[in-house]
Image: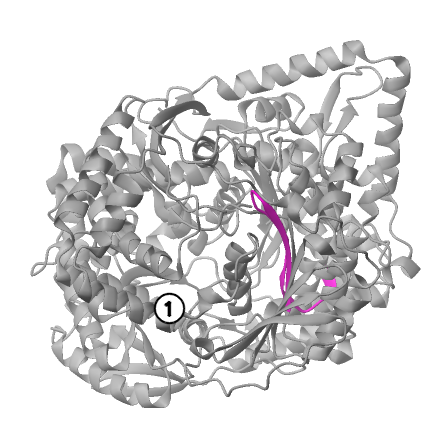
Amino acid sequence: GLGAQGARGLAGGSSGDMQRATCAQAMVAPSGYEVLKEEDLEEYAAKATLLKHKKTGAEILSMEKDDDNKVFGIAFRTPVDDSMGIPHILEHSVLCGSRKFPSKSPFIELRKSSLHTFLNAMTYPDRTLYPVASQNEKDFYNLAEVYLDSVLHPRAAKDPLVMAQEGWHYQIQDEQDDALKISGVVYNEMKGVYSSPDSLHARGTIKALFPDVNYAEDSGGDPVEIPNLTYEKFKTFHQAYYHPSNSRIFFYGNDPVEKRFELISSYLDEFEALPGGSGHSMVPTQELKGKPWSFAQSIPAPKGQEDKKHMATVGWVVSEEPFSELEGLSWDLIDQLLLGNTAAKLRKTLSDSGLGSSVLGGGMSTYLKQPFYTVGLKGLESAQVGIKVQKLVMEVLQEAASDGFDQAAIDAALNRVEFSLREFDTASTQRGMAFLFGAMSDWNYNRDPVKGFKFENTLAELKDKLSSDEAYLQNLIQTRLIDNPHRVLVTSSPDSTLEEKKEKELEEKLARDRETMTTEQLDSVRSLMEQLKERQATPDPPEVISKIPRLTVSDLDRDTKTIPEDKETIDGVNVLTHTLSTNGIVYADAALDISDIDVSLLPVLNLFTRIASGATGTQGKDRVQLRQHIDTHTGGVSCSWGSSTKVDRNDQGLTVVRSPKTVQVRLYMRGKATAEKADTMFDLFNEMLYSCRLDDQERIVQMLKESKSGMEASLVGRGNSYAVGRLSSRNHMPGLLNEMTGGLEYYNTVVAMLEEAQKDFPSLQAKLQRILDYVASRTKEHFTINLTADEKSLEKARGSVSKYVGSVDFPGELKEEKASNTLSSLASKLGGSDAMEGVIIPTQVNYVAMGGRMYQAGERVGGSSSVVTNFLKTGYLWDKIRVMGGAYGAGFSLNARLGTFAFSSYRDPNVKLTIENYRKAADYLINADIPKEEVDRAIIGTISGLDYPQTPNGKGQTSFSRYFTGYTTEDAQRWRDEVLATTADDFKQFGLRLKKALETEGVVGVCAFGSNTALTAAKEDGLDLELKEAFAK
């Protein structure tokens, strides 16, 4: 998908000790290399060395840091001058077999059977990046070696079948009807991207801003252009750009440095330098234009839903030169001030203007050669409104440039920027990966990859600048934006006939191609199809698979990782603490059990938690003052809610499947702050929850518009998760709750709430008030607090908790009036699990899910089930749905706590064929004679998922959720033991159980999100789907 900053990924589907780094010894250059630069990164207790391979000119950034999660990456600069998607197709193709590892897909073999914590590849507009990560040194070097061999010596450079499969090829329907079709993994992926209005608008913005350089084309590939790609052109591109002279190689972690150079020398030494080095791949500079202009395009929209679907973005290329470190950090600060949150000046003005539904663009971007700035609105009445949006943007910028920002706002924004630099909590991105992504933004353009990590001096310089030059930020806004004529207004207008037009144009093109084909050409299309089918259907021989280096089960840790946890009571409230190194930061969660809330209030909970996150301010502070207060004193405070299922146990104390009719619901206040500010953070928990403002009609209407437009985009882009969600909602309470508060059903609720907010606000406000009254009626027994910090900070935080508990106005005892309409009353809505549903969305691809109940309440699901699940995903489904079917991804999930399963596909050209393949999965497991090596590989891949690296905050959250569900370290260890003990017979038993579920009447249902054309065709082809529009009028 679209990963880091506009990159396209391959896998269908992510302890910053501040003490001084002990100054490492200067590196002696390994033989064949010269050291260009060495830096001690005291900010991160790390060391970075930049080297050059003398023979080829390849550059290597070698980072040493005491971190088990080691990262390797190799990148090539890959500029394009057309939109055939060559870099993207190559990114997929090079991982389909290489000189040393000739199997069909070493990538999927590694996915199946390594301890990778990251394994993917990304195509950016001007570079292609291949990163891997693992916490096991042997595994890490296996991954790095396979990746190096794949990019430098891929089978794809000699074998046209690879490009045909991953890029595009013709298919002939059948003997009687020899009409042509086009298939290919990237082709179908990009059809999905080009169905997304948001993606197309973002693409149009880059194209408009950089009309004269490579960025005007789409490196991911335009589905209309992809079929123009020839194998010759593909091969030439690989030869030109996938060469050490054009490469950047990255290492990070605690592995021995000499081992890094041994590995890369074994590859680099056999190459000669390219005559011009990497000069041929430099992206030219977009010269700044002398006057503003505009750019308009069409985007798809559902029929009858065109109104209020226009988008507009104002964009600037702000400079022909890169920013200095100081200016880069200054723009981080300006972005925080103008767009950093809902109360920031520019975001708030656009949001409150009523012109559109939600703000687009995040301000300054620096991941391409030149910095560019974008901001806009979606959900506009017409393209003309774009002119008003531009006028408003210019007014706010002008006001900021003339009047500046008040000191309190600057202090708050600066604290927030500084907090995130020091915390370096990269959340879902691992630390080493964050260094790699950060380095590439400069390194790709021959700039110093390390200077961006040295933030202390730059931060001090920025603070000096702010105190010595009051107009510093104002001048930047004035010169870089207001006085800069290289400005474009991009408008995208909805066209409900666009998808049909595209389909019709494609049909006509294919008919023309078919007309002009000679018998020989038709025969060669058939022959390629046959060869491809045969290749796809023939498993790699064991001796080929065995060439891929891999761990054995004996290399694996037998013990589950534990998280430190202590339980105590502070003033009558249960508190969990986790002593972990957090750099002086306290992470806190206050959870409130709200499981007996009135069911009618559930759909309003999302709105309530956004309000309690500060969206409308509090009784004592408007939303701007509140946001400044949060940012001045903390790293963030928010409110959320979630549901979970308690573990059920049998007489032996083992976990078993729980009744589908139970669920727990909790409200959370979450925050992070330095230990000195913990008091303020807890005061904010109290103020934001109990004194939130429920009467701001204008703001609440705007928030509901944002929710509606956000859901419209995600229903089209992530149809697979919505389809699986609908299946779950028929089978168990947590699934039903998720559908009511986040699924397709919730979309209709949001539409209704928006109307209510506009026409009968008092009735919506009354529901919000009922939630607040209910929350205020909770007693100490309903409260649990979770703290994650180092020992010293925890000690301070305990005092803050005591003050907090004392300040909450708890009722003496629980009022006895129970909601008549509790969650258990929802149980009657479960059922109809065998429904066959087709949901029509404006798209050119499909998302097909099928699932139901596989285990009954009280039955035990063993750890081996996760090994079989992993095996199905990376084996049978990958081959059938992706490799042969042409979908971008396929999945299988089993909910061990609730006993249900689901198959799903992502950006899939098929519907009926996919379901037929799902139905054959059980027989495949029953009849497959799975050798022990294959079972072991699946075990290794499964353990990799259990041992994912987590930040201290992540560990604290995991432990907190286990506390509520009753899942213990012993349960986790037993599960791991069962994973490690999996045998071939477990696969067969799982297959038999799956077969029984598939063949029992009334158990298994289907839900497919897709285009009208595809769903109607599937129905006509005998699939008994009940069709409905996702966006009913």
Direction left: furthest residue = 620
- Determine crowd level at label 1: few under 14, some 14-19, many 20+ residues with C-alpha closer than 10 A: some
Q: Is residue 820 visible?
A: no
Q: Secondary structure at mark 1?
A: helix
Query: Which residues make up the magenta segment?
Result: 112-133
Q: Dividing the picture into quarters, in which one does residue 225 lie?
A: top right
Compared to residue 29, the image places residue 791 above or below, namely below
Q: Is residue 367 visible?
A: yes
Q: Amino acid at mark 1?
A: Leu
Count of numbered circles in the view: 1
Q: Is residue 143 magenta?
A: no
Disc 1 designates what residue?
A: 421
Q: Dividing the picture into quarters, in which one does residue 509 lie?
A: top right
Quarter containing the C terminus: top left
Who is closer to the viewer here, 268 or 690?
A: 268
Compared to residue 852, the image places residue 51 above or below, namely below
Who is closer to the viewer here, 265 or 771?
A: 265
Who is closer to the viewer here, 749 or 452?
A: 452
Please state the horizontal and vertical placement of residue 119, each as a whole percent of the image. Answer: 65, 59
